[in-house]
Image (tube, rainbow, N blue to C red):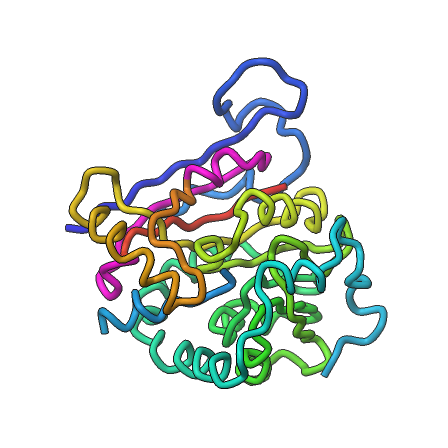
Amino acid sequence: MQQQQQRLVAFPPAGRTGSGPTSLAPKPRRLCALAALPRLCRCGRRHLLGSASSAALLPALALPSPAASPVDPDAMLERVHPARPDWYEKFYALAMDKFMKPYEAEIAEYKSKVFSQLMAAGKNVLELGVGTGPNLKYYASADGVNILGVDPNKQMEEYARAAAVSAGLPPSNFTFRRGVGEALPAEDNSMDAVVGTLVLCSVNDVGMVLREIKRVLKPGGLYIFIEHVAAPDGSFLRFVQGALNPLQEFVSDGCHLTRKTGEILEEAGFSNLSLSSRRLSTAYIISPHVYGVACK
């Protein structure tokens, strides 16, 4: 039987002495929808090797001006993820659209759980690694939601726009922007939520990306995440991941099989973090997953 782990962690406000997680009961630092949630069950890329092995612009006032990152987003994009040849980006986008269906079918249960915490109506949402738009059906139908989809692969835009329309989102409420997580194209404190699934495995600097997510989130804003992670140290799967990691990075646009993303998230300084783990059956190499909701 597959095992599942759950953790709900609250972190002390800045300046409080002591170490380690604290109880959620005493006075939270700021109001956050996550504090009242029940426990959940426990770059931007989707992963071809792992999955295949197992089976119109916004109006000017709709979203804040995408120009306030401490580092120029376009310069960072060219530094960490310069454009690949068109044929490669087209092939990669097509492959993600076609070959991720078994994975998406199994992960749907867990996506439904985390996206149920996102009250997106009338909100500004940034999706990092929007890809072909497989997450949009979970939240894009909310009334008045404005979505900024960020992805380094420009060929993903056609698929993402089609997914947004299919989910019921007016075309004017969706903007696609080439970019990377290390310098998000959004103002400080401008987003009600950031969404990222299968993203942190492929970014250059996980810590920088998480700092950028916190920068663009409003106080109390939510970060919705689902990520594959390294198997436990000493396990056979961890050995396999280590052996295949160079190949995975090459064929899956920088995806790392051996990142301990759950541990990184726990140390990222979110005020509240609901983190759950699960192993999937349809994607053996990337089967260990963490998912949940973090609050700024």
Compared with 203, 296 (above or below) is above
The answer to whether one can see residue 119 in this image is no
Nearest the eye: 78 or 156: 78
Where residue 194 sits in the image (x, y, percent)? 61, 56
Residue, far top: 17
Residue 291 within the magenta-colored segment of the rendering: no
Residue, x 70% and y 62% (percent of image)?
A: 124
- Specify the quadrant of the image occupied by residue 27: top right
Residue 290 falls left or right of residue 78: left
In this view, 92 is above or below 231:
below
256 or 161: nearer the viewer: 256
Residue ID at (76%, 49%):
70
Q: Is residue 222 at least partly visible in the picture? A: yes
Residue 285, magenta (yes or no): yes
Q: Residue 6 in the image: x percent, y percent?
A: 35, 40
Residue 241, position in %: x, y?
26, 52
Magenta residues, as a range?
A: 263-286
Residue in the picture at 42% in, 42% down: 275
| Count of picture labels | 0
Question: Picture coordinates of residue 201 (x, y %)?
Answer: 44, 54
Q: State which quadrant residue 208 falls in.
A: top right
Quadrant where the image shows the C terminus: top right
What is the quadrant of residue 91 in the picture? bottom left
The residue that appears at 41% across and 54% down in the rendered structure is 227
